[in-house]
Amino acid sequence: MNTIKMILALVVGSVAVESSAGDITGQVTLKGKPRPERAVDLRSDSAIAAQYPKGMKTRHYEVGSDGGLQHVLIYLQGDFTNTTFAASGTTTVLDHTNGLFQPYVVGVRVGEPLLFKCSDGTICSFHAMLNAGADFSVTPGRDTVSRTFAQPELPVLFRCDLHPWNSAYVGVFSSPYFAVTDAQGRFTIRGVPAGRYSVALFHPKTGTTAKPVVLADHPATVDFEVFPR
């Protein structure tokens, strides 16, 4: 009988642990009409210009069919530096492809590698403009170069010294609780422990904002409306 009770207790305890974490989902919607995207001058690079017979434009606002805004970094605010998290096991890559850094906005964990490569065969550079600490620049060539960040920072702006129209934004976080909106402006932050949080967003053009959320034993939804600047 004692053995049965012990097994039941372990099962209940396991369920309780699993139910103590949930997902935060939502959508970021752009309200209002942004300024038209600007044409990019590609005369300095004929190889890239040949890939865009109709011309290249900036990508400040990429909006889905229902107004959902892509390339928005969503994250939980707070100090997680004293909390230990398992390694993500994912590989985050910033790639120069078709004359652009891809992805435009991305998140990475403190201490985990961010890989840089130029898969389109061009000579490119990744120049990081840090808010804290010294800037750095890498030129992968035909190789893949890896760098890590020692502390959280948002955002780290990357520019290409050889392609002045090119930029990307990287958020560096001490926790795994971040996501980037998809083509319809939707996001999911998975496995968040129950509690009270502030869900924040960053977008290169609309700026930053935050909303409170209470996460209990079921998923929470947090939607945002942002406006062009």
Image (cartoon, rainbow, N blue to C red):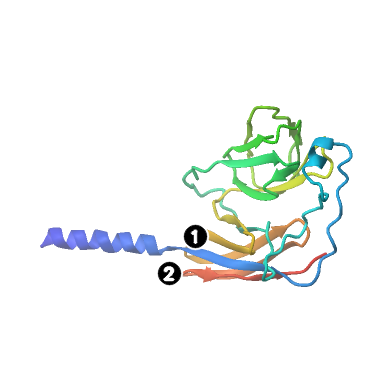
Seen from the viewer's position, the closer of residues 211 and 117 is 117
Location of the N terminus by quadrant is bottom left
Residue at 89% in and 40% down = 43
Label 1: how many Cα within 10 Å (few below 14, some 14–19, many 20+) = some
Q: In front: 13, or 58?
A: 58
Q: In this view, does 229 lie above or below 166?
A: below
Query: 10 Å neighbourhood of mark 2: few (<14), some, or many (≥20)?
Result: some
Q: Can residue 156 be seen in this view?
A: no
Q: Answer left or right for 110 relative to 55.
A: left
Q: What element carries label 2?
A: loop
State the count of labels.
2
Q: Where is residue 135 in the image (x, y as percent from the top left)?
A: 76, 36
> How far across and down, in percent of the image, does residue 96 sit?
71, 39
Residue hosting label 2: 217
User: Residue under circle 1?
Assistant: 192
Please give the name of the residue rendered at 56% of the width and 52% of the height, measured from the top-left corner: 80
Q: How far apart are marks 1 and 2 (CA)?
A: 10 Å
Q: Which amino acid does label 1 sit on?
A: Val
Q: In which quarter of the image is residue 32?
A: bottom right
Three-letter residue code for mark 2: Asp
Left or right of residue 40, residue 90 in this image: left
Question: Which residue occupies 59% across, 37% down?
Answer: 113
* Residue at 59% across, 54% down: 79
Residue 204 locus on image (x, y percent): 76, 56
Residue at disc 1, secondary structure: strand
Q: Can residue 168 be seen in this view?
A: yes
Q: In which quarter of the image is residue 145?
A: top right
